[in-house]
Image: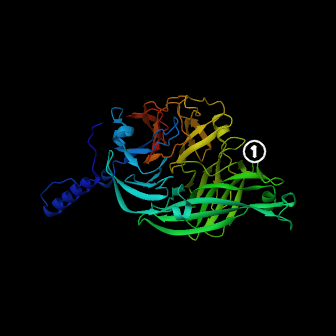
Amino acid sequence: MIRNFINFKTIILLLTIGLISACSDDDNDVEIPTESEEQSERWITVTGARMGTNPADGNGGTLIYAISNVDAKNTETVVDVFNNGFVAPSNRTARLQASEDGTTIFNISYAGDTGGNYTKYTVEGGQDFIQTGSEVSIAPYVGTAPRWIKLFDGDQTGAAVYVSTEHEIDDNGTPDDVTDDTYIRTEAKVGVVTLDLVNSSIKNFQEISVALSAEEEAAGYYFSRVDMPTLNAAGNKLYIGGRLSKVDPATVESESGYEILGSKTIVLDYPSLLNPKVITSSVGYGNTNGYRSINSFEYNGSVYQANQNDPNGSHILKIGADNEYDNSYVFSLDEALGLSDTYIVAWRSVGNGKAVVAYEHAGSATGSADKTQGFFALVDLDAKTAVKLDEIPASEDLYLYQYQGFAIYENEVYLTVAPVGQDGNIYVVDTETGSVTKGAQLKNATGSHFIGTF
């Protein structure tokens, strides 16, 4: 695709020349652009995950390509990210984030020799992403396959987390006779590192032991995965989502089919990353760690969080300003959509009380890549309602489980919609009106899929 992309540095230079000319000659009728005109466009970075060994595994690398929001809405625009895109450094699918204005892409490589390396790029349009600042590795703190997210603090900070576990066994004084061993608990040590996104440096690192209740631990429950750190509105607490696993205390063997406990979140003091506390929902059950996409968002003084693997279908949960679950807030996606066993695979709150949700549900088709079909819905957090976006074409090969990014401009959300290995389009959702606009064409590659916009 050959298109003319706006160079924001050129715009700034031209505006500066115009301002100087206007000031130097009172008779010169130069029209000075308003601030809204200066900010009239945003880069939309389209992201594709190339097939590795199997269709839709996303393990063949990540490619990105930037177009303006105007071009993103134009059905004549053609984006061929898999042939023309910039390769985001990563052994497998890169873990990407974007600045709030879309002019910067942040990347931490996932797995392999470069796993844990943080880099950032200035977006210049098309395949032009210019590395800026120094590269820094967070691998010594959280390993080469870190789970990280950008905090909503004005693009200042990123946070990455990991958990390591160890079973505590009492041998009852007979170390050679395992039949006398007694299971005590499984200790979960959670590591958290905060990253200065501006200066490309480590801000803080802490490893803390996070305990469940004595009863839960005696039954064999423990945190086996943590992810998606989120700042509260006051900026003094960090919420970390988690998944629980369980062992049989009699054998210390992993269990399946166990009772799912109420959804839990780890609360830490911020920025110290100390004084862990675990809060539990009585509304939702299952995991709060999400997968590839941000799973919790601050809105109107509270944090709204999706859960997964809930026996009653996914809920959107609310954590209040008191840093506790608000169990008076009940938002069941099953009830809102009239479905059963819904599963929020990714979502994005826009900030006006609306959100776009990517989800699966019981009865979803399984496509040719042996992946479950995904759908999109528009959600109202205040009214606790959800409406399926029927304007987005359905396909049993529309795979959304690895979806990562939702670019936002004003109240609009930009979605990539293309079945595995098939061409598709960008769709733009106006969260105020609910209207959906079909946009740019997306050229796909065999076995590959799109994982969102940034």
Q: Which residue occupies 60% across, 57% down? A: 302
Q: Secondary structure at mark 1?
A: loop
* Colour theme: rainbow
Reply above or below: 191 against 439.
below
Expressed as whole percent of the image width and height from the top left, the position of residue 386 reads: 59, 39
Q: Which residue occupies 14% across, 61% down? A: 26
Q: Which of the 4 image quarters holds residue 416?
A: top left
Q: Is residue 190 left or right of residue 146?
A: right
Closer to the camera, 243 or 446?
A: 446
Q: Which residue occupies 58% across, 42% down? A: 345
Expressed as whole percent of the image width and height from the top left, the position of residue 451 reads: 48, 42
The answer to whether residue 326 of the structure is visible from this angle is no
Expressed as whole percent of the image width and height from the top left, the position of residue 63 reads: 41, 44
Q: Which residue occupies 57% across, 58% down? A: 229
Closer to the camera, 157 or 391?
A: 157
Residue type, mark 1 in image: Ser
Expressed as whole percent of the image width and height from the top left, the position of residue 118 reads: 45, 59
Q: Which of the 4 image quarters holds residue 134?
A: bottom left
Q: Is residue 118 left or right of residue 257?
A: left
The answer to whether residue 189 of the structure is visible from this angle is yes
Closer to the camera, 192 or 351?
A: 192
Q: Is residue 422 left or right of residue 33?
A: right
Q: What residue is shown with label 1? A: 256
Question: Most extreme residue toward the front, as rendered?
Answer: 176
Closer to the camera, 402 or 168?
A: 168
